[in-house]
Image (cartoon, grey):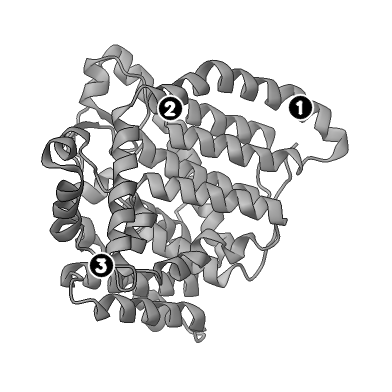
Amino acid sequence: MKIPSFESLVVLYVILVSKSLYYDSFGENILLFPFLIILFIKAYVLKNDPVKMPVKSILYSLALLAIVVSNLDSQFSSISVLLLRLVISIIIVQLLDFKVFSVHFSNIIVSLGVISLLTFPVIYFNIPSVFPDVIGMDERVIRNFVFFGVWENFIQYDIYRNSGLWWEPGAFALFLNVSFIFDIVNRRITLIKYFIYFLITLTIYSTTGIVTFLLLSLLLIQRVRARQFLTFSLLVVPPLIFSFVFYFLPNILGKIVVGNDSFSSRYYDFLVSYEMFLDAPFLGYGFGSQLQNAIPFGINLLGEQVYESVHPTGADGLTMFIAQVGIAGFLFLIPFLVPKYACTLSFIERVIIFISLLLLFNAENFTFILIFTVLTFYGISGSKSMLYGKSIS
């Protein structure tokens, strides 16, 4: 059995401390401290050759900290965690080139995705686990199978959805689509791998994940060579059309038209953040002060009865970030949404990447989690060596 490399373990740790079930179970942000110590020793104690400092990432960090600290409503605990994330991400970018990070990331997520397909027999046969249950971040009880978890409600009510290693399907969809983006950028998509992504997306059944996957699939059409176009069209396009018309579209329209709880919650998340941004556009309402400021503001804006009925969850990560730090937040999001690691793509392709990242990270609140900071810093630094794998075939 091959021993995992240090690089793969670093990427795995980033994934696990980004709101996975293990993050919820073993201390949440406390897990960042041992990670920082390990990375520091590797980068500055054990490494023989000097590590080149990522100057742009450091300047970005200092500017963000200055904006955050200047607002007296910002929470000290949130600033401390932000500092931890920034330092950890700086060291990761120093140690791992984007190509190394992204390849390991995709390999891990695809492997976890394939294993997570066992969710369906677990639900159908009500298979117990020998491991203790995990309590998700929203207090839901999740049956623990080490490589994936299954919400007890899914088993009880025969709901066939796949959450992978996260507390709910939408969070898993975010990681799967980021992995898909990485493989597209690195030209590591084959037809077999594409269908693996497609199958896992079907099992997750997340509206945002579905829309993003279909959007990213458009990038592959112009990537195939002329002699492969007919094969690609016959094998990929019909299933996509069929799935969209008979599977995805009813689900999407149902959420929007019928007034689905998930859609309503996200709409009011955005509305509260938008109104709070207008209320304090320059410095924001305070980094990490959603509990202290946003919830009372939301109750006052919507009325207590409406607020309790729609129950905004603060899932709008990007717009919440802008509302908390003010208008400068737009500038801090540029390297994340327009990443340098995608600079080899065409303008249209980069627009699709922009929209995809915007959809994913504004439907799930990962803006205050390590994966967001790491992606932002790779968006600043790009890749030193874009050595591509196979094209789709």
Quarter in which the C terminus is drawn: top right
Q: Residue at x 56, y 30 (%)?
A: 198
Q: Secondary structure at mark 2?
A: loop
Question: Residue 305 versus residue 269: which sits nearer the camera?
Answer: 305
How far is disc 2 from disc 3 in space, using C-alphas? Answer: 32 Å
Horizontal relation, residue 307 to residue 41: left or right: left
Task: State left or right for residue 332 relative to residue 338.
Answer: left
In terms of image quadrants, where is residue 11? bottom left
Q: Which mark is residue 205?
A: 2
Mark 2, residues whose alpha carbon is within 10 Å: few (<14), some, or many (≥20)?
A: many
**Mark 2 or mark 3, whichever is nearer to me:** 3
Sooner in the amino-acid sequence: mark 3 or mark 1: 1
Mark 3 highlights which residue?
Answer: 287
State the residue lying farthest toward the right: 227
* Secondary element type, mark 3: loop
Q: Is residue 380 left or right of residue 349?
A: left
- In front: label 3 or label 1: 3
Task: Classify residue 169 by image quadrant.
Answer: top left
Residue at image position (57%, 18%) is 245
Of callouts 2 and 1, the N-terminal one: 2
Residue 238 lies, in percent from the top left, at: 68, 20
Residue nearest the viewer, comparing 107 with 338: 338
Q: Which residue is mark 1?
A: 233
Q: Give residue 178's position: percent from left, percent from top.
A: 50, 48
Q: Quadrant of residue 154?
A: top left
Q: Looking at this view, is 90 or 356 the one in front?
A: 356
Q: CA distance from mark 2 to mark 1?
A: 24 Å
Horizontally, is 45 left or right of 146 in the view? right
Amino acid type at circle 1 is Ser
